[in-house]
Image (cartoon, rainbow, N blue to C red):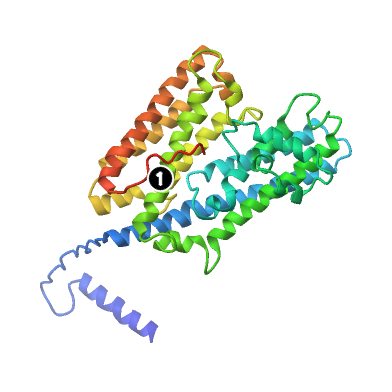
């Protein structure tokens, strides 16, 4: 039947094309303009939240779990060597850097399972103004049994990526992973903390994506602790402002200071020399959160609901300018703040971040009528 119908259709089409069909004149069918689909604000928010969850948040946390798993495996592999070399240590360092990068990319979220059970601070206790990380590592090394249970029982500073950084990247001969007298205990500590980091990452992802009780359902629908989808967006955007403030104040201004040589020891990741890379990844994360990855982001939402493209164009221009400015700094941040030429390059970056935050807090917020808590910076 499908073949017969297709034959008739083709024959009719040929007759029409040749002027057949018994008619000397044929009327052209006017083009049909497809109807414009207009979204309500609620429908647009539904699409926006779903895209942010599916195209940024869940992929970011999934990547964190993957990299934490690789870090855990790398720690076990490293410590299995009787006398590991610099090459084996380099592999472990690379695994830590990848896990840290994945964590930095997820930092525009800080909602739901991540904010529960102190997971955010257990994963990364920073700024560390009280030497909690070094004290926590010392307590772990002094424990009779060094394992994941011992790590979980200690303060937040001993549990996450900064504690691992201190152990893995420390170059002081007495504390270095290859040369310290207690290097076996240090290896046990590395494996225990890496296992704990993996556990925290898995708890966050599982808490988001559980089939019936996962936080993703509340995030997408404005339920649970939220009374509306707008409340979810306001909470999400609040965390963007907090991260921007942390970048400007803690990650840059506190390290740069006002005079040479600055405070390089305050850099977020000064042992691994990855502090500037963290900032680049944070900015990429904010852009991914704004655009909802490759899904329905604020760029489309502003046009659909507010018929505005200029604010989106300005925000994207800020992201491009910030990327350019960070790329002009050719040294690790803890080194850059000690050199006047590099300090001069940091100043316009800090100024541009301030401008970006101001633009978001005025034009973007006024247009969207969202009401985030601007005073949300609790020190990260």
From the top left corner, tell me how far across and down residue 193 is, in percent: 72, 44
* In front of the other: 20 or 100: 100
Count of residue discs: 1
Q: Indicate the secondary structure of the residue bearing disc 1.
A: helix
Can you tell which quarter of the image residue 269 is in? top right
From the top left corner, tell me how far across and down residue 196 is, in percent: 69, 49
From the top left corner, tell me how far across and down residue 238 is, in percent: 40, 45
Q: Name the residue rendered at 76%, 48% in the picture.
A: 150
How would you rate the neighbour count of disc 1 (Cα within 10 Å): few for under 14, some for 14-19, many for 20 or more? many
Above-or-below relation of 345 to 123: above
Q: Name the residue rendered at 44%, 42% in the picture.
A: 286
Is 7 left, or right, of 37 in this rendering?
right
Q: For the N terminus, give its image quadrant.
A: bottom left
Q: Name the residue rendered at 78%, 48% in the picture.
A: 147
Outermost right residue: 82
Q: Name the residue rendered at 88%, 35% in the picture.
A: 83
Let me know if residue 327 appears in the view.
no
Task: State the residue position of label 1.
Answer: 238
* In front of the other: 164 or 20: 164
* In front of the other: 77 or 198: 198
Is 151 left, or right, of 218 in this rendering?
right
Above-or-below relation of 37 to 102: below
From the top left corner, tell me how far across and down residue 365 is, in percent: 30, 43
Outermost bottom residue: 1
Let me know if residue 380 appears in the view.
yes
């Amino acid at each position: 039947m499908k073949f017969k119908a297709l034959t008739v259709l083709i024959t009719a089409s040929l007759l029409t094309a040749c002027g057949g069909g018994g008619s000397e004149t044929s009327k052209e069918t006017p083009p049909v303009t497809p109807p414009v689909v207009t979204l309500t604000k609620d429908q647009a928010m539904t699409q926006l939240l779903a895209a942010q969850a599916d195209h940024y948040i869940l992929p970011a946390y999934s990547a964190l779990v993957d990299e934490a798993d690789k870090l855990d495996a790398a720690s076990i592999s490293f410590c299995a060597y009787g006398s590991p070399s610099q090459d084996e240590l380099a592999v472990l360092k690379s695994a830590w850097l990848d896990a840290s990068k994945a964590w930095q990319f997820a930092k525009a979220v800080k909602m739901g399972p991540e904010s529960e059970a102190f997971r955010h601070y257990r994963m990364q206790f920073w700024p560390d103004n009280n030497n909690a990380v070094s004290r926590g590592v010392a307590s772990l090394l002094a424990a009779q049994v060094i394992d994941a249970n011992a790590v979980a029982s200690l303060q937040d500073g001993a549990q996450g990526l900064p504690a691992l950084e201190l152990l893995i990247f420390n170059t002081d001969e007495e504390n270095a992973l290859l040369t310290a007298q207690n290097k076996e205990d240090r290896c046990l500590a590395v494996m225990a903390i890496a296992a704990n980091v993996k556990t925290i990452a898995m708890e966050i992802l599982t808490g988001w994506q559980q089939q019936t009780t996962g936080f993703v359902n509340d995030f997408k629908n404005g339920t649970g602790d939220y009374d509306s989808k707008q409340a979810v967006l306001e909470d999400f955007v609040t965390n963007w402002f907090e991260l921007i403030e942390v970048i400007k104040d803690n990650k840059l201004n506190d390290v740069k200071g006002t005079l040479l040589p600055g405070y390089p020891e305050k850099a977020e990741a000064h042992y691994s020399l990855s502090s500037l890379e963290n900032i680049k990844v944070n900015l990429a994360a904010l852009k991914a959160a704004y655009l909802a990855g490759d899904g329905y982001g604020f760029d489309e939402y502003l046009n659909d609901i507010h018929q505005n493209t200029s604010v989106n164009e300005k925000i994207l221009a800020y992201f491009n300018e910030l990327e350019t400015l960070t790329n002009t700094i050719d040294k690790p941040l803890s080194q850059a703040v000690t050199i006047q030429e590099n300090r001069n390059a940091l100043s316009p970056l800090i100024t541009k971040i301030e401008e970006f935050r101001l633009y978001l807090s005025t034009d973007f917020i006024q247009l969207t009528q969202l009401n985030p808590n601007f005073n949300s910076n609790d020190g990260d």
